[in-house]
Image (cartoon, helix red, strand yellow):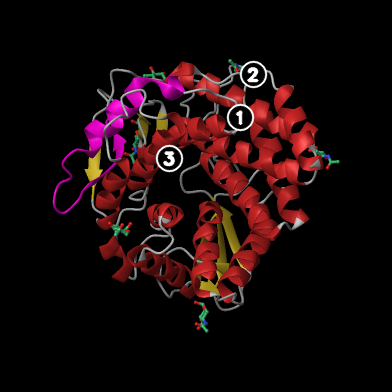
Amino acid sequence: MRNFILFIFALSSARATAPPELFSPLVAQKVLAAAKAPLSPILFPQYTDAAVGKWLLFNGDAWATSFFPATLYEMHRRQKLCGDEHGVGGVDWLELGRTWSTGEIPSETKTGASHDVGFPFIEELKVNPRNETAKTAVKAFAMAIAKRFNVKVGCTRNGDSPGPNFQVFIDYMMNLEVLFVAEGITGNHTLRDIAIKHADTTIANQIRPDGGTWHIVEYDSGTGLVTKKRTAQGFSDDSTWSRGQAWGIYGYANMHLRTNFPRYLETARRLAAYFVSNIPSDGIVPWDFNAPTTPAPRPADSSAATIAVNALLLLSQRELTVRNSTGAQIWRNAALSILNNITRLAWRPDWESLLSNGTVDLPANNTLTGIVYGDYYFIRAGNELKELGLASC
Ligand SMILES: *[C@@H]1O[C@H](CO)[C@@H](O)[C@H](O)[C@H]1NC(C)=O
Ligand SMILES: *[C@@H]1O[C@H](CO)[C@@H](O)[C@H](O)[C@H]1NC(C)=O
Ligand SMILES: *[C@@H]1O[C@H](CO)[C@@H](O)[C@H](O)[C@H]1NC(C)=O
Ligand SMILES: *[C@@H]1O[C@H](CO)[C@@H](O)[C@H](O)[C@H]1NC(C)=O
Ligand SMILES: *[C@@H]1O[C@H](CO)[C@@H](O)[C@H](O)[C@H]1NC(C)=O
Ligand SMILES: *[C@@H]1O[C@H](CO)[C@@H](O)[C@H](O)[C@H]1NC(C)=O
């Protein structure tokens, strides 16, 4: 009851509003256009070209494969939240989500399968907890991650290569979710212990005193000692790559959701405070917070922005569980501010993607594109805000 009263109080004193583009008919139209008639074998949209915003398609074992099927599940959720409005009427989004996620199932058996492939199956289990195909997939992906855990290091590694150079990306905080869902299916608590150990080791070694993060920490797989801290996609080894920071906020807010351990809430706050306070006065999230501002414009990463919006909304909800309505409001307003600014910059009616100004990988010159996970988290932000009573369809 007390929580509920605080919740209502926090909601009623919110000021910022959500951008109307979140529920534009273009959302359903564009997603549907990309989802029609999957090829066989299914090729997945990951990012667009930078000139005209056409989706580029990739095999099912590429790391961002999950996000398009997960987008279709998110549209199914929207249909339930909003009714048959805005062009979503008559579309069986759930069927589309199921069709598209089958293209990922072959990755289960590939030892090199990426960390990021389990999400649509988690969504399927929310709709139908008894779907055996989805259960098997989640278990397989969780086991693949668990197999990459090294007790000496205290983390799960990048890929299956057995070499001494054991690399941990900040991004993996996002994938711990699969371990908790698989624990729920199997009752195997080792999976949860691995997630907790990974999160704790990452707190110790991958977060700077100012709350920024290293993209990659390398460990010696034999001794477990840190050998190097560096970047792959950021500006420099000591910079904070904004998308990694956003994955980190989400990962720790989610760890708090899963465990209620105060240290995870505190860590999510530190990472969030860094993110929010390092956004420049133009309100636009740069691809790396430490990248030089000249020559202008410094490329944005709209995907870092929309991931952070979802992360901050989750963090805001976590604050309510510790009766911190002030904290909840701070993060909710920050989320809305980031969302408004990125929408103003990157909303692109003439492209196949919803947003432009994504940076997939700046060192590889892959920038100024639409990105599948940028769009996914944009749609999901709309759904979350609708559920919180902070936006209408
Ligand atoms: C179960 O889930 C899988 C994978 O998400 C999907 O392909 C399949 O259609 C679902 N089966 C049923 C009966 O809903
Ligand atoms: C639980 O999961 C761990 C990690 O994958 C595995 O090593 C162990 O054998 C599992 N335990 C059982 C009882 O299945
Ligand atoms: C946003 O994208 C447009 C069009 O691709 C580009 O001209 C502009 O420089 C970008 N701005 C930022 C901050 O990334
Ligand atoms: C409430 O949340 C804010 C923002 O996370 C934090 O700075 C503050 O310490 C929290 N207050 C309490 C009493 O936990
Ligand atoms: C855009 O960002 C600026 C600077 O962070 C912020 O003051 C402003 O409120 C944001 N705009 C919107 C519409 O939220
Ligand atoms: C990216 O572009 C810069 C400037 O044109 C060039 O020097 C660099 O080699 C390119 N990098 C890659 C990976 O293509």
> Dot 1: within a 10 Å radius of its alpha carbon, few (fewer than 14), some, or many (20 or more) residues?
many
Q: Which residue carries the number 1 mark? A: 335
Foreground: disc 1 or disc 2: 2
Q: Quadrant of residue 320?
A: top right
**Cα distance in 3D space between marks 1 and 2:** 9 Å
Q: Which mark is residue 16?
A: 2
Residue type highlighted by circle 3: Arg
SS of the residue under disc 3: helix
Camera-nearest residue between 386 and 382: 386
Magenta stretch contains residue 28: yes
Question: Tag count in the figure?
Answer: 3
What amino acid type should be assigned to the residue bearing mark 2?
A: Ala
Question: Does dot 1 land on a helix, a strand or a loop?
Answer: helix
Q: Amino acid at mark 1?
A: Ala
Q: Quadrant of the N terminus?
A: top right
Mark before the other along the chain sequence, 1 or 2 = 2
Residue 239 found in image quarter: top right
Q: Nearer the viewer, mark 2 or mark 3?
A: 3
Q: Which residue is mark 3?
A: 77
How many C-alpha atoms fall within 10 Å of the one at disc 3: few (<14), some, or many (≥20)? some
Picture layout, residue 57 above or below residue 127: above
**Whether residue 332 is visible:** yes
Residue 356, position as x, y percentages in the image:
38, 25
The image quadrant that residue 315 belongs to is top right
Q: Say left or right for 74 vs 339.
A: left
Which of the two discs, 3 and 1, sits closer to the camera? 3
> x, y percentage for residue 293?
55, 23
